[in-house]
Image (cartoon, rainbow, N blue to C red):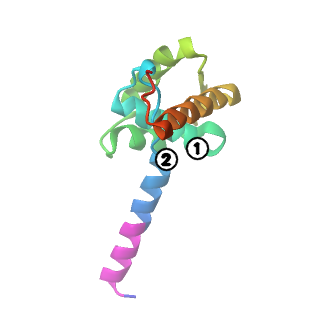
Amino acid sequence: MNVHQENSMLREQVRQLSEMIRGTLFEFPREWKLTRAEQRLLNSLYTGSKGFRRHEALIYAVAHSDWANDALLKVQVYKVRKKLKPFGIEIKTVWGEGYELTPASSEIIKRAITSQDQFSITGQSASA
């Protein structure tokens, strides 16, 4: 394998890993009033193994770049926690590692996404 082939292969691996970190893009209820960055954070957490993501992965998921830092992530987590607390959704800190959704929070999100999908299928809006 030459340098150009190896470079192409590595770029494709990075692209695939980036997609895994970002997670599937789910539509969250409008009542939650999440910004795009907050939605990316919640998507990444929700699609992570057992609702967990490492700091580095979440930083990339939120900012889509390498320039972001831990302070930006902490601010985003704070904002998402504040917005989702009234809906019973909790994000726990795993000190020195990352963040995770509680199992109950994952279930609430799953139900919210499912109800959104049902409204979409019938052609009604989620606010109807």
Q: Position of residue 41 (x, y in %)?
A: 45, 34
Q: Residue placed at 52% from the left, 38% from the top? A: 117
Q: Earlier in the sequence, mark 2 or mark 1?
A: 2
**Label 2 sits on residue:** 23
Name the image quarter holding residue 115: top right
> In terms of secondary structure, where does tag 2 sit?
loop
Q: Residue placed at 62% from the left, 37% from the top? A: 51
> In terms of secondary structure, where does tag 1 sit?
loop
Check disc 1: other Cα within 10 Å, few if <14, some if 14-19, many if 20+. Answer: many
Decide which of 58, 86 is in the foreground and name it: 86
**Residue 48: assigned label:** 1
What is the quadrant of the N terminus in the image?
A: bottom left
On the picture, is 104 further left or further right than 84? right
Q: Position of residue 111 (x, y in %)?
A: 62, 30
Residue 55 seen in the current view: no
Question: At label 1, which amino acid type do we have?
Answer: Gly
57 part of magenta stretch: no
Q: How many marks?
A: 2
Q: Position of residue 12 (x, y in %)?
A: 39, 68
Residue 33 seen in the current view: yes
Q: Residue furthest bottom?
A: 1
Q: Is residue 67 above or below residue 72?
A: below
Q: Is residue 3 above or below residue 108?
A: below
Q: Are marks 2 and 1 in contact (CB under 8 Å)?
A: yes
Q: Residue placed at 48% from the left, 14% from the top? A: 82
Check disc 2: other Cα within 10 Å, few if <14, some if 14-19, many if 20+. Answer: some
Q: Is residue 86 above or below residue 102?
A: above
Magenta range is 2-12
Magenta stretch, overall SS: helix
Q: Position of residue 71 (x, y in %)?
A: 38, 27
Question: At label 2, which amino acid type do we have?
Answer: Gly
